Image (cartoon, rainbow, N blue to C red):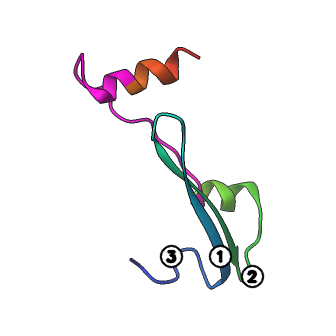
Amino acid sequence: MREKLFGNCVTRVGVIEFQKRGAPHSHLLIWIKDFQPSPENINNIICTELPNEGDPGTKEQEFRELVLEK
């Protein structure tokens, strides 16, 4: 793990949860010293991705179909 990736961390708290079908996800709250909360700074830190489509019949494909049907 790289130290001070986002800057000097003042404190942090987090929890890992498991949804109905067992998919883990986390909620994290991190306080960074002297962080300027501008849209550009926030966009540089936060990102998300969907998994690959996967081959037919695989868990990846099943997950993608489940997410996209909503």
In the rendered image, residue 42, in percent from the top left (x then y), is placed at: 67, 58
Q: Earlier in the sequence, mark 1 or mark 3?
A: 3
Q: Residue at x 38, y 36 (%)?
A: 51
> Does the magenta stretch mainly form a helix, a strand or a loop?
loop
**Element at badge 3?**
loop
25 vs 58, left or right, is right
Question: In this view of the protein, which residue sits in the foreground, 21 or 60?
Answer: 21
Distance between the Cα atoms at labels 1 and 3? 14 Å
Numbered badge on residue 5: 3
- Residue 58 is left or right of residue 63, and the answer is left
Q: Position of residue 16 (x, y in %)?
A: 54, 58
Q: Amino acid at mark 3?
A: Leu
In this rendering, the count of numbered labels is 3
Q: Residues within 10 Å of mark 1 (few under 14, many from 20)?
A: few
The segment highlighted magenta reads: 45-62
- Residue drawn at x 60%, y 62% is 15
Q: Quadrant of residue 44?
A: bottom right
The amino acid sitting under disc 2 is Asp
- The residue carrying mark 2 is 34
The type of residue carrying mark 1 is: Arg
Residue situated in front as seen by the camera: 33 or 31: 31
* Image side of residue 21 versus residue 62, left or right: right
